[in-house]
Image (spheres, helix red, strand yellow):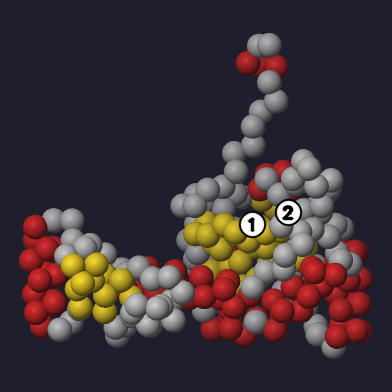
Amino acid sequence: MSPHDETPRVSLPLLGDKFPQMEVMSTHGALNLPHDYAGSWWVFFSHPADFTPVCTTEFVSFQKHLAQFGKLNTKLVGFSVDQVFSHLKWIEWIKENFQVEIEFPIVADTGAVADKLGLIHPGKGTNTVRAVFVVDDQGVVRTILYYPQELGRNMAEIVRIVKALQIADAKQVAMPANWPENELFADEVIVPPANTQELQQQRLAQAKSGEITCVDWWLCHKKLR
C-alpha cells in the first residue's frame, strides 16, 4: 500500500499542546475555541450521550460546583455527539425533575469535533468517551482525564486539579499526593529540587532560615504564603 493511500491519523492534543482551534455550535450559540475563553481557565468535558443516567448526575454535579470553578476564573463547557435540540430538551428535563438549571454551554457535534479530539472509542459504538480537558488561560491543555462509561466523575477532584495547577504556576511549586491533605506534609507544597550549585546553596540557606523544610536535598517542602 502506498503511503498516500493510508488514512491520515488524527493528531490528538497532548499535555502542553494548544487546545485545537474549532468553531462549534452550542446551547449558548456559536463558540470559537479556544479563542472565546482567552484569559480564563476552562474545563471541556465530554459525556457519552444526553438522557443517560450517569451523565445526568454528572451535569447536576458540575452545575452545583459552578461557583467553585468561578472562584478559580474557570468556565465549564460540556460536549457530546448530540444535536443542540437534544441538549436543550435534556437541560429542560433536568430543570423540571431536579430543579437545577444548567448554566454552562453544551457543544453539539455530528462527529467532527469528537474525531478531532479522539473522543469516539471504536469499541463503544457512537457514544462519546467520558473525558476531561483542563485548559489554562493561554489555551494550553494542562490535564486530560478519561473515564469508563460506567463511572461518573468526581467534580471535587477536577476543582482540586485546577486549583493545584494555578498555585503551581503562580508559586513555582509542585503538589504532593492528595494535596491539600497529604499524608506526609498535610497542606504544604513541594519545593522543586535544586538543579544547579547556586540553587543548591539557596535551598540550604532557605532550610537554615526555616523558610523550607528538607527531608533530603531533593525533597523539600514549605507552607504556602
Instruction: Pinpoint residue 185: horizontal percent, then vertical percent.
Output: 33, 79
Q: Is residue 79 visible?
A: no
Instruction: Pinpoint residue 65: horizontal percent, then vertical percent.
Output: 65, 82
Q: Name the residue under label 2.
A: 129
In front here: 95 or 124? 124
Give the class, few, some or many, for how many residues have Cα within 10 Å of label 2's Cα (few <14, many ≥20). Answer: many
Q: Name the residue under label 1.
A: 146
Which corner quadrant of the image does residue 82 belong to? bottom right
In the figure, 55 relative to 49: above or below?
below
**Total number of numbered discs in the rendering:** 2
Q: Earlier in the sequence, mark 1 or mark 2?
A: 2
Instruction: Pinpoint residue 103: horizontal percent, then vertical percent.
Output: 74, 78
Determine whether, in the image, residue 16 is placed left or right of residue 92: left
Determine whether, in the image, residue 61 is placed left or right of residue 27: left
Q: In which quarter of the image is the N terminus?
A: top right
Which corner quadrant of the image does residue 49 belong to? bottom right
Amino acid carrying mark 2 in the image: Val
The residue depicted at 13 percent of the width and 56 percent of the height is 196
Asked if the residue at tag 2 contacts the one at tag 1, i.e. Cβ–Cβ closer than 8 Å, the answer is yes
Instruction: Pinpoint residue 74: horizontal percent, then vertical percent.
Output: 56, 74
In the figure, 42 relative to 127: above or below?
below
The residue depicted at 10 percent of the width and 71 percent of the height is 204
In the figure, 82 relative to 64: above or below?
above
